[in-house]
Image (cartoon, helix red, strand yellow):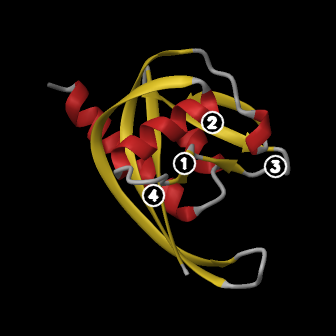
Amino acid sequence: MKEHSAGGVVINNGKVLILKKYYGDWVLPKGKMENNETTDITAVREVEEETGIKAEIIKKIGYARYHYLNQEDKDVSKRVDYYIMKQIGGDLIPQKEEGFSFADFVDYKMAVELLKHDSEKRMVKNAIKIYESFRGK
């Protein structure tokens, strides 16, 4: 079984948006593609749905692949495409229905330390490099 998702590393004033799940894991906003969405549309929609933040894509960062067992114990091959984004509006309100208890913009080093998944840590590191290169221009 295959699954395709997309998400964002949202940066505001040099800080990175991360979400805390009720069970304690820190993650980046992301979610499954719907209907005939492209990954960029999915990423923007998921950021807004999960956090209340309206964001605009700066550039694609890359993607991560991994496997997990779903609720029926079936192996799922998952791909998540990530984009670096900047906040353009909205209010930071974590979506409780999706299992998020808290959201905040934190220093990127703190984000790397807190995030559970190595693939997300890698995306934040890549995003900061891109952000710094854009900011320097």
Verify CB contact (< 8 Å) between mark 1 and mark 2: yes
Between the residue at mark 2 and the residue at mark 3, the CA separation in whole angstroms equals 16 Å
- Find disc 4 in the rendering and name its residue: 122
- Pointer 4: residues within 10 angstroms few (<14), some, or many (20+)? some
C-alpha gap between disc 1 and disc 2: 8 Å
Indicate left or right for 47 with 83 as reference. Answer: right
Q: Give whichever of 44, 85 is nearer the camera.
A: 44
Q: What's the residue at 81%, 49% (across, down)?
A: 24
Q: How far apart, in angstroms, are the residues tagged by discs 1 and 3?
A: 17 Å
Q: Earlier in the sequence, mark 4 or mark 2?
A: 2
The amino acid type found where label 3 is placed reads Gly
Q: Earlier in the sequence, mark 4 or mark 3?
A: 3
Question: In the rendered image of this protein, does residue 133 appear above or below residue 115?
Answer: above
Q: Residue at x 49, y 52 (%)?
A: 34
Disc 1 to disc 4, how far (Cα)?
15 Å
Q: Nearer the viewer, mark 1 or mark 3?
A: 1
Please report whichever mark, 1 or 3, sits nearer to the chain's N-terminal start: 3
- Label 4 or label 3, whichever lies nearer to me, is 3
